[in-house]
Every structure is written in structure tokens, then in C-alpha cells.
Amino acid sequence: MIKTYEDLEKLSAKCSSCLDAKFTGADGKRHIVLCGGTGCLSSHSDEIKAEFEKLIAEKNLGDKVTVNQVGCFGFCSQGPFVKIYPEDTLYRMVKIEDVAEIIEKDIENGEIVDRLLYVDPTTLQKVTKQEDITFYKKQVRIALHGCGSLNPENIEESIGAGAFKGLARALKMERADVIKEVLDSGLRGRGGAGFPTGRKWSFAMNGDGDKYVVCNGDEGDPGAFMDRSILEGNPLAVIEGMMIAGYAIGAQNGYFYVRAEYPIAVKRLQIAIKQAEDLGLIGDNILGTNFSFRVHIRLGAGAFVCGEETALLNSIQGQRGMPRPRPPFPAVKGLWDRPTVVNNVETLACVSYILREGAAKFAENGTERSKGTKVFALGGKINNVGLVEVPMGTTLRELIYDIGGGTPGGKKFKAIQTGGPSGGCLTEKDLDAEIDFDNLVARGSMMGSGGAIVMDEDNCMVDVAKFYMEFICDESCGKCSPCRIGTKRMLEYLTKITDGKGTMQDLEELEELAANVKSNSLCALGQTAPNPILSTLTHFKDEYIAHIVDKKCPAHVCKNLMQYEIDKDKCIGCGLCERQCPVSAISKTGYVAEGHKLPSREIDPAKCIKCGMCMASCKFKAISKK
């Protein structure tokens, strides 16, 4: 049990020594770690781990080698990852059948398995260490501290890496001084709104009676997995941030609200809470002080609207997840009508860093108005899909090209959607814009929680707006009329346009309706729902006009405005497309191209259902969309 500051310092020193021994090999062992994030687990990371353990047991290497899982490495498109300490060798895209070779060559004979190394696409050189991969070079890990290096189910590793040092420091300070430290750091809420974290805490600190801290882990943006990865990779950092917030405002209870679709994050959070309770780091009279704190978990059912803080609070209370009118704000009247601080996962992970390393250290990164770093889930039409943490002020060009590796297949970059359904599209002219809260808003988008979806020339921007509006319509709670009715009407307009039935008057009415929904909805879901429409209208109005006037989709995405066509001179008459067509829309023409022996094929547009099977099956690229 840890009862005093001295007990924590002694355990921290011991655990730090053990952790250093693991990384440096001072313990005389080799240490195999595997990525245990959801992405790699879905690619059989668990089975790979089991195979390592099986072969190590068969070869009697148990006293020389250890195997465990850590959090997300971030470079998801190259997973599953295996790293071997103390050499720090990184293997990527490892399969179960590769395990025997790694054991035989690397573990037993000290030879690197070259074929499993990352190959730099620019130099074509093989890279052995993670920090030498371009994807990681411009990243700074603060919120992702420990992810990819610490075992999230072993509290001693986290303590060795500095866990609870921030809390210990905070407990020696006055509550107001803790809040001042957070204010001095410049930390703004990473959930999307960007409100200064310290100011929110100060409002709650001045309240009376019972108070609460709530961690918003209800990450609902399509393609976003930042919060999930932090909870999976280093849950104790978030728990510690919550406890620091609790001490600062005078709360004794904290609630994690995590969506039930994150079972691995929930499991590791439960383990971390139990281990901290067993050590006396959660409970009564923590570190011998009069500060007591309990941590609870509530599971969300996956409603996007519960990412809005007042809807989330209603859900915790067992009520329907619908937003409340504000003011009063939760910091004044929140959970069970008591003062409540709601911070998201990334914000609380930053808090533990700030109290451990100091406000000045945190503020070394970032811009004048946006300090620190930001975690992004980089996805879509991008070579290096993954989780990245970059200093505020990093440009979109650096994010997309230096870290993301650009768009696949040499396709032309078209736009990046930041902020998910609540955000907007940024285009080529914005590539040199610095990433910070105010700059993105000024350009018609927003930071959001950190989703970043890249699109290329093959994306139809009208279809993109329609996709997000379909999502919003499904997720609207229906409490206020502008959102409940307005989003459905906007979707009807977009559907009409993508079906080739829209008019220019529809376009005018859509833009007017979007402005009204934005200004009159109750909560942020409705207020930001029109953003994808408004931003695509600003940057890609010509695509809307093409759908309406020319009855064509320039990107050949919208089915009702698209046709498949066979180039008779390229077609060799093999008939594979005809056999693949599920509706018998392809037939012989009687035309035989020069140099060929069989008649070419043609597609009957009246029968064609635009499934794309013919184009996918043609080996001679004789079929195209128009």
C-alpha cells in the first residue's frame, strides 16, 4: 500500500529502474512487445502473442525473453507491430507465420529479419528503429505518453514512467494554484470547443456542496479513434488527470463515460482503477492527505449526441441522452444539479503531464493562442493511416504529406475534413495553414475532437456532404425542431441533387436552410450539422452545379448520374465482364477490334445497376466510368 509521498517516491524509483532495465537490457533479458490497440488486435495481435509464448516455452527461453502487449503504436496501416528491446528493433505487418523466424533469427541468433522492416518509400532504405521512420519524426507525444511502450495492464510500468507524480505535486499545492498551473499552460479543451480548461475548473471550484468530474469518452465521429487509443494505451494518465481535476475543484467522485463499443478500453480502464485502488492511490486519504476520490465507469449506448456534455450527463443519470438548454452550464449545475467539470480523454491526459512536467514545459509546443499538441486520427485517402500527435502550429501540408505520406496512387489531393460531421472541408489553398483552434474556425472548419479524413480526386464532395448528413439525421436526438426537421430536409435536398433531380432553386433553398439550422438549433450537434454542406458549397459549388445543370457527377460516384462504358478497341472479347454481371446487362457487339479474334462487348445502360463488377473484373482496363 502507498500511504505517503515517500512510499510513492520509493515505488516510483524501483519501477523506473525496472523499466529502464527493460529498455536498455540491463536485466539481461530480451523483451518482445506487441501493439495491443484495437486495430492490431483485429489483425490477430493476440494470436501472434500466443504464438510467441508457445515457441518461447517450447525452446525453454522463458528466463531470457518476456512477451507483453502495449498500447497503439499509431502507424495503423503498417500493423501489427512487434518491437524487441533492448535493440529497439521494430517489425511491421507481422503475421502468425512470421513468429518462428523472429524467434530463430532475432531472439536466438541476434540477426534482424530484414523482410519485416519498414521500407522508407523515398529512399527505399530499410529502417530498424521507430524514431527513424518519417511518420514519427514530427510527432511529440504528450497525450499519447506511454502508448506503444508501456503495458497498460501493469500499473508498475506506468508508475515507473511517472504516473501519479503530477497528482503528488498537485496535492502539495493550494487548489487555486493547481488551477493557475493549468491556466498558465494554455490548455484548451481537446473535445472540440477549445474552451480554456482552467477557466472551466475555476467556475466549478467556486460552487458549493458535492461536485463531480466527468471524463467524456463518448467518441462518436466517423473514423475517429483518438480517445479510444489513449484509454487502451495509458488509462492511468487519464485517471490521474481526473483526480487532479477533482482535487482542484473539491470533488470526491469522478465518472468515466465510455461507449460500450470500446470493450478493450473499458477492460483496461477497469484493471487500472482496480490496481490503483489496491495500492491506495484511489480511495480515502490519498498519499496521507485529506483528499479522497472514487472513480466510476458508465457505458454509453453509442449515441453521437451523448458527446454533447449535457446529453452525456443526462445519460449518466439514467435519463434519455438529450441536451439541456445552457446556461446554466455544467460547471454551475451539472450532474445531479451539482457543479460538474466535463473534460474529454485527451484533455485529462494532458493535465497529468502538465502537473508532472510543469506548465512551461507543456507550453513549449504550440502557437500563441493554442498551446501544446493535438492528437489526430488520420484516415481516408492517405498512405499512412494512423494516430498522430503533433504540436499545435503544424501545417496541414506537414500533416498530410510529411506524416501522412500523401495520397495513394499519385491521385490529386482534393480536401481534408477536420472535425468530423461537425467540421468542414479544407482544400489545397489551406495546406500551409497552421493547425490551431482559431485558425481552422476562421477557414470554415474546426478542430473537433481530432478526426482528419483526407479526400482525393475520386471523391464527390456532394456525396461527402450527403454521407455526413445521413449520419447526423440518424444521430439527432429530435429534441429541437431545427435539428430534427431541418437535417432531414437538408438530406432530402442532397439526395435529390445526387439523383440528378435537383434544381438551382433547390440549391438556394438548401443554403438558406443550412444557415437557419446552424443559428437556431439547441445544441452543438445541430448548430454544426450544416458545416459539411456550407463548406462544400463554399469550395466546391461547381460540383453541385454539375450535378444539377449537366446531370453529371464529375467524380463518377453518384450512381444515378454515372454510366459504365466499354472501349471496343481495348476489349479483347474474353467475356469475363459478361459472366460477372449479375443482371445480364452486357452482351456481344459483333465488332472485332484490330488484332483481336473475338467480338467486343457493350453495356445496356437501361439494365446496368452500376455495381462495378465489370470494371473490377476487366484485366485490360477496357471499362471506364463516365
Image (cartoon, rainbow, N blue to C red):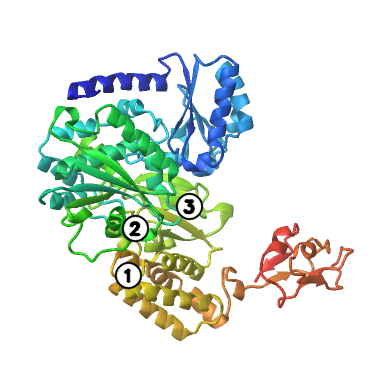
The residue at 56%/14% (across/down) is 60
The residue tagged 2 is: 306
Image quarter hosting the N terminus:
top left
Decide which of tag 1 and tag 3 comes sooner along the chain.
3
Residue 203 placement, left or right of 471: left
Among numbered discs 2 and 3, the one appearing first in the sequence: 2
Asked whether the residues under the numbered discs 1 and 3 touch, taking CB atoms below 8 Å apart as contact, a structural biologist would say no
- The mark lying in front, picked from 1 and 3, is 1
Q: Residues within 10 Å of mark 1 (few under 14, many from 20)?
A: some
Crowding at mark 3 (Cα within 10 Å: few <14, some 14-19, many 20+): many
Q: Nearer the viewer, mark 2 or mark 3?
A: 2
Identify the amino acid type marked 2.
Cys
- The residue that label 1 is drawn on is 479
Check disc 2 and report its element: helix, strand or loop.
helix
Residue on which the image places disc 3: 379
Callout 1 touching callout 2 (CB < 8 Å): no
**Label 2, label 3: how many angstroms apart (C-alpha)?**
24 Å
Residue 613 percent across, percent down from the top left: 70, 62
Q: Is 229 situated left or right of 273 in this image?
A: right
Q: Secondary structure at mark 3?
A: strand
Asked if residue 352 can be seen in this view, the reply is yes
Give the residue drawn at x 56%, y 40%: 43
For the residue labelled by badge 1, is the local secondary structure a helix, a strand or a loop? loop
For the question of whether residue 365 can be seen, the reply is: no
